[in-house]
Image (cartoon, rainbow, N blue to C red):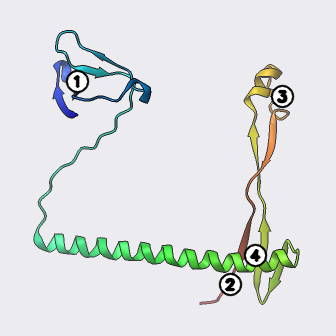
Amino acid sequence: MTLSLHKGKGGYWWLIIRGETPAAGDGAVSRRNRHTGVRLMTGIALQGTVSNEVQLAPKTRVALLKDLRAHAKLKQQIKDLEAQAKALNDRVNAVREAERLDKFEIDGFSVTLVAPVREVLDKQKLVALGCKIEWLTKATEKVPTAPYCKITAPKVDR
């Protein structure tokens, strides 16, 4: 399949797809232009990028690559540290669960089970109720979300 971009009349851009196109079973809808014989995709989402080539000075390029590599290294360190913190959190949470506590404190650290509940508007109920303003609260349901263990470190004076 080849893609080409052409500027048409009135400043419009046309994406021309030539060659094999997705099958109808893939959710694609297409039709063939009777004048040009080009198949036009009418029911498929396409994404594209525009790239510009930029010439960088050698010093700028070296500095940019150095910064990008440092950034990637820091991101990896953050990922590793987050994995370690999660493992420690899981160990502390296991102790909290074994002791059957929702909250406890030890040497300034606070361990709390946080189990949030969010409210969701049931649109089917809203329609069934006739969509009056005073019925909005009746159509709102509380849905539990995943509980998690929150660990708060003591404040340290600097």
Q: Secondary structure at mark 2?
A: loop
Quarter of the image for residue 22 reads: top left
Q: Position of residue 6 (x, y in %)?
A: 16, 28
Q: Pointers 4 and 3 in contact (CB under 8 A)?
A: no
Residues at marks 3 and 2, CA–CA distance in whole angstroms: 46 Å
Q: Position of residue 125 (x, y in %)?
A: 80, 27
Which amino acid type is marked by label 1? Tyr
Location of mark 4 (residue): 93
Q: Pointers 1 and 2 in contact (CB under 8 A)?
A: no
Would residue 84 appear left or right of 118 to someone viewing this image?
A: left
Mark 3 or mark 1, which has the lower sequence index? 1
Q: Position of residue 9 (x, y in %)?
A: 17, 18
Mark 1 or mark 4, which has the lower sequence index? 1
Please state which of the two labelled residues, at mark 3 or mark 2, is closer to the viewer: 3
How would you rate the neighbour count of disc 1 (Cα within 10 Å): few for under 14, some for 14-19, many for 20 or more?
Answer: few
Residue at 53% x, 78% y is 81
Would residue 25 appear left or right of 133 to someone viewing this image?
A: left
Location of mark 3 (residue): 135
Q: What numbered label is drawn on residue 12?
A: 1
Residue at 81% x, 77% y is 96
Mark 3 or mark 2, which has the lower sequence index? 3
Which amino acid type is marked by label 3? Trp
Residue extending furthest toward the top: 34
Please state which of the two labelled residues, at mark 4 or mark 3, is closer to the viewer: 4
Residues at marks 4 and 2, CA–CA distance in whole angstroms: 21 Å
Q: Pointers 4 and 2 in contact (CB under 8 A)?
A: no
Q: Secondary structure at mark 4?
A: helix
Q: Quadrant of the N terminus?
A: top left
Location of mark 2 (residue): 155
